[in-house]
Image (spheres, helix red, strand yellow):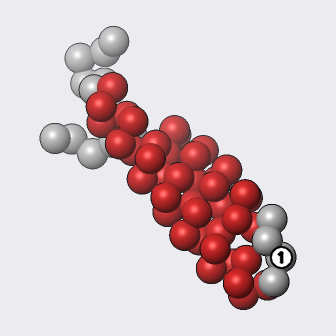
Amino acid sequence: MAPDAPSPAARRKQIIVGIVVGLIIGVVVSLWTGFWLWLAAGAAVGLAAGALMKPPAE
């Protein structure tokens, strides 16, 4: 692991925050459009964003 790499706990927290934000966005878009599959799409985008983003420094 590189010296400036985030800790595993910070990485897990970032992924969880990404999923939660994606679910919230998915719920809003689902209610707005009436199409429930936006919930799954929001969760997938949140997971991807959480996995790709670097957690903030502690």
Residue at x 35% of width, y 42% of height: 13
Q: Which residue lies at the image location 46% right of the left edge and 43% below the top edge?
A: 15
Q: Give the number of callouts.
A: 1
The vertical placement of 7 against 15, above or below, is above
* Residue that protrudes farthest toward the bottom in the picture: 32
Q: Is residue 33 above or below residue 2?
A: below
Kindly identify the amino acid type of the residue bearing the numbered disc 1: Phe
Name the quadrant containing residue 33.
bottom right
On the rendered structure, is 6 left or right of 30? left
Residue 24 is at least partly visible in this image: yes
- Location of the N terminus by quadrant is top left
Quarter of the image that includes the C terminus: top left
Residue 2 percent location from the top left of the image:
31, 15
Q: Is residue 28 left or right of residue 40?
A: left
Q: On screen, 21 above or below 45? A: below
- Residue 16: give x, y in percent of width and height: 44, 47
Which residue position holds label 1?
Answer: 35
* Quarter of the image where one finds residue 41: bottom right
Q: Residue furthest front?
A: 36
Determine the residue positioned at 58% across, 46% down: 47
Locate residue 20 relative to residue 28 in the image: left or right: left
